Image (tube, helix red, strand yellow):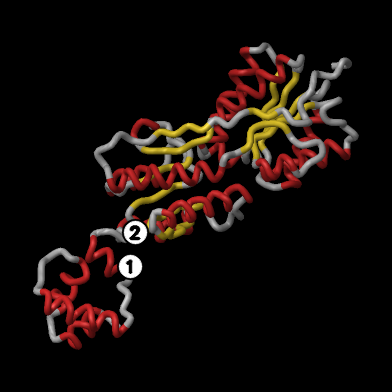
Amino acid sequence: MNIGEIARRAGVSRSTVSYVLSGKRQVSEAIRERVMRVVEESGYRPSATARALAHGSTRTFGLVIPPTSEHLAVEQLRFVGAVAEAAAAHDHDVLLSPSGEAHESAFDRMVGERRVDGVIVMETMLHDSRVARLIEEGLPFVTIGRTGAEEAHSWVDLDYAGLVTEAVTRLAALGHERIALINRPQRLLDREYGPAFRALDAFEKAVVAHDLRGTAVCAEDEEESGAEVTRRLLGALVPPPTAIVTVNERALDGVVAALRSARVVVPRDLSLLAVTSEEHARAHEPQIGGADVPTTEMGRNAVEALLRRVTHPEEPLAHVLLSPPFLPRGTEGPAPASA
């Protein structure tokens, strides 16, 4: 059933059916009742495209996720779920669109054909072509993370720089003089991925400020890479670090496994702090200290910020920087006496 068939059965034109369904123009009560009777009898439901044409809105948000070649981490999946739930609370659907060169056509269709009312972009780079395209198209959007031109667009971000700085400061106060940072993959740093770039920059500044010996390394987003990098830190540095800070959630299990294999007792021999999910941190023994990523809050904030951009474009851009509390738990302790 489509509008043309409804028009034929009701004995009116297609445009009249459209006016009845959209309410854009006034029609007589008799015609409106006749059209609506056919609609109800046929069980007609307008498609998203029809609703967009009728009302100027798709009631759909686009969510640009990382490339499908990179399996989403647990926290990323939770974020996608949080966005879908928050959007549903506002009677909106969510259309997923993978990013990356292999999927440029999908992004182009979503944006160029106005399949959505607005877009949320994940994994934002400091110089991000997707952001430039959305600005050029004039389509409302919010990024998770922020570009180098953060005043130019709406964003929701986690304060990686502040959290890494706090981690180093806490460890320095506990007497640690040799600290390592396990960051996200080098390829993300090369592409100027915001969280990895800001974490590294903050780490380098913090170790200088506290006159410490800092070593920054990258790990792939996988457990084995985390273990390999940790073994390298313990074996190649003389003396080895007495504390490790990581912002790589998917490498974290490997870090813990390598420490255990090397008979390094945490936090007696080495302190470990991470920016990860609460569930991930609590799954280890001892529980890993650091900051819990507020995934649900980020998703909710992103949807609400995008909804404001869509409905009230004249309002100021949203800049939401989340800084969850630091929780020492069981892996933060003083530097070992032999250090």
Q: Position of residue 199 (x, y in %)?
A: 58, 30
**In this rendering, position of residue 113 left or right of residue 258:** left
Along the line of sight, the residue nearer the viewer: 120 or 56: 56
Residue 225 point in image, percent of width and height = 73, 44
Q: Residue 162 placed where, x, y %?
A: 56, 25
Q: Quadrant of the C terminus?
A: top right
Using the image, tell me which numbered label, if any, was put on residue 29.
none
Q: Earlier in the sequence, mark 2 or mark 1?
A: 1
Q: Are marks 2 and 1 in contact (CB under 8 Å)?
A: yes
Please indicate whether residue 164 sits to the left or right of residue 158 in the image.
right
User: Which residue lies at the image location 69% right of the left edge and 21% below the top edge?
Assistant: 214
Under circle 2, the secondary element is loop
Q: In the image, is 11 to the left or to the right of 334?
A: left
Q: Nearer the viewer, residue 324 or 122?
A: 324
Can residue 124 be seen in the rendering of this structure? yes
Amino acid carrying label 2: it is: Arg
Amino acid type of the residue tagged 1 in the rendering: Ala
Q: Nearer the viewer, residue 129 or 39?
A: 39
Using the image, determine if residue 270 lies above or below residue 19.
Answer: above
Image: 166 above or below 34: above
Q: Residue at x 33, y 67 (%)?
A: 48
Q: Quadrant of residue 334?
A: top right
Q: Which mark is residue 59?
A: 2
Residue denoted by label 1? 48
Label 2 environment density (alpha carbons within 10 Å; few <14, some 14–19, many ≥20):
many
